[in-house]
Amino acid sequence: MTSLAVVISSCVAVYAVALTTVQVIIARSNLRLNLYDRRFDIYLRTLDLIHATEGWDDLTEEQRRAVFIPFIKASRESRFLFDSDSGIFELLSRAYADVFIFKGYQENREVYRNYPPPEFIKEFNRANDAKLRVMESVATLETLLQPYLQFGISIGSIRLAKNIVAAPMKSTRNQST
C-alpha cells in the first residue's frame, strides 16, 4: 500500500510541477503581451500626433490637446519601456521639441506675419522643417520599434507545455487500468 501511495504522491508532485511550469509560461506571455500593448500604444499616439499636424489649422484647441497631451505622456513613458540604447526615447524627445516649434509657429502665425520678410521666412522655414522632421520620424520609429513589437509565443513552448501537462495524466491513467 505504501508503494502505491509513493507512486500517487510522485504523480501528484510531477503534475503540480507541470502546472506550475504552464503557469510560468502563461504569466510570461501575459507580461510580454502587456509590454507589447503599451509599446504599440506609444506608436499609435505618435501617429495620432502626426496626423493632427497635417490638419492642425482645422482642429480646435481641445482636439489639439487631446492629441498632444497623450503624445507627451507616451514620449516620457518610452524611457521606461525600452532599452536606454534603443534610441526611441531620444527620437520621441526630438519629435516633441519639433512639435513645439511647429505648434508655436502655428499659434503665433499672425504675429510672425508682422515680422520683416526675411525673419518671417526664417520662422516659416524653421516651423516647416520641424514639421517635416516629425513626419519623417515615423519611419525611424517603426524601425526602432520592430524588435520590441515582435510578439509571439513559440510553437515549441506550447508543445512543451502540453507535453508536460499531458505526461503525468497519461502515466496516472496507465497505472489505474
Image (cartoon, helix red, strand yellow):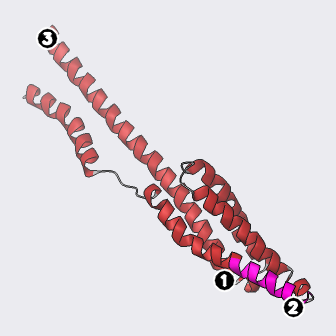
Q: Residue at x 67, y 67 (%)?
A: 95
Residue 160 % position (x, y): 23, 41
Q: Which residue is at a point 52% across and 71% down the rendered structure image?
A: 139
Residue 117 placement (x, y as % from top left): 87, 91
Callout 1: SS: helix
Q: Give me the residue at 64% from left, 74% from top.
A: 133
Left or right of 29 on screen, residue 90: right
164 relative position to 1: left or right: right
Tag 2's secondary structure? helix
Q: Which mark is residue 3?
A: 3
Query: 33 and 20: which one is in front?
Result: 33
Q: Which mark is residue 79?
A: none
Q: Is residue 29 visible?
A: yes
At 87% from the left edge and 80% from the top edge, which residue is drawn?
A: 108
- Residue receiving disc 1: 54
Q: Position of residue 144 (x, y in %)?
A: 50, 61
In the rendered view, tell whether residue 26 sits above or below residue 72.
Answer: above
Disc 2 marks which amino acid?
Pro
Q: Residues within 10 Å of mark 2 (few under 14, many from 20)?
A: few
Could you say which quadrant of the image residue 111 lies in? Answer: bottom right
Asked whether residue 62 is in view, the answer is no
97 inside magenta stretch: no
CA distance for labels 3 and 1:
76 Å
Which corner quadrant of the image does residue 118 belong to?
A: bottom right
Identify the magenta region.
Answer: 115-129
In percent of width and height, residue 152 lies at 36, 54
User: Mark 2 sits on what residue?
Assistant: 117
Q: Is residue 65 above or below residue 124?
A: above
What secondary structure is found at the residue carrying circle 3? helix
